[in-house]
Image (spheres, rainbow, N blue to C red):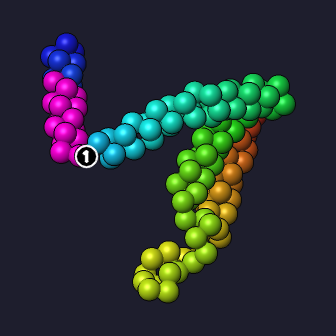
């Protein structure tokens, strides 16, 4: 186990060093932009996103039965991931005139359908769990 950890550490350090050497070729304005986005992302996560998730999780635990907690948490995580992935293209308004292959779908409908599938699976998990618990209690 220790050998695997050492190997993973070496791979990580090597990959990090390679990334840093690639960034040394960037000019100062690009490096400042990278630092700003990196720092801004950390601040946004720690100051807004993490407390909001904690508050929603605590609220959900008070409102939902305990057997629903895990499926609801998975559904919430899937919803957030899908929304973050879709956010850049949701307000673009469809295909661009100079290149119709770019943004050639109805992304709002696609996101809505994906969220319906995610929450249908949450409901399916809750119903399946309830049926299994009833079957074991008989």
Q: Quadrant of the C terminus?
A: top right
The residue furthest top is 2
Q: Is residue 66 visible?
A: no
Looking at the picture, how far across and down is residue 41, in whole percent? 50, 37
Q: Is residue 86 above or below residue 62?
A: below
| Residue under the point 55% across and 65% down | 89
39 lies left or right of 3: right
| The one of 41 and 5 positioned closer to us in this rendering | 41
Q: Quadrant of residue 73?
A: top right
Q: Report helix, strand or loop for mark 1.
A: loop
**Span of residues in magenta:** 10-27
The residue carrying mark 1 is 27
Residue drawn at (16%, 24%), measured in percent from left and top?
Answer: 10
Residue 84 placement, left or right of 135: left
> Callout 1: 10 Å neighbours few (<14), some, many (20+)?
few
Quarter of the rendering occupied by the N terminus: top left
Given residues 49 and 74, the one toward you in this image is 49
> Magenta stretch: residue 136 in it?
no
């Amino acid at each position: 186990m220790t050998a695997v950890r050492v190997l993973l550490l070496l791979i990580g350090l090597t990959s990090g060093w390679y990334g840093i050497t690639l960034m040394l070729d960037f000019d100062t304005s690009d490096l400042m932009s990278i630092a700003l986005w990196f720092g801004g992302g950390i601040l946004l996560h720690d100051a807004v996103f993490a407390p909001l998730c904690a508050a929603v999780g605590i609220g959900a635990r008070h409102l939902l039965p305990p057997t629903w907690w895990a499926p609801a948490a998975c559904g919430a995580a899937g919803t957030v991931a899908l929304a973050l992935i879709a956010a850049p293209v949701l307000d673009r308004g469809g295909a661009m005139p100079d290149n119709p292959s770019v943004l050639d779908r109805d992304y709002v409908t696609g996101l809505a359908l994906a969220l319906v599938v995610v929450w249908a699976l949450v409901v399916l998990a809750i119903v399946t769990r309830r049926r299994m618990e009833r079957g074991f209690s008989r």
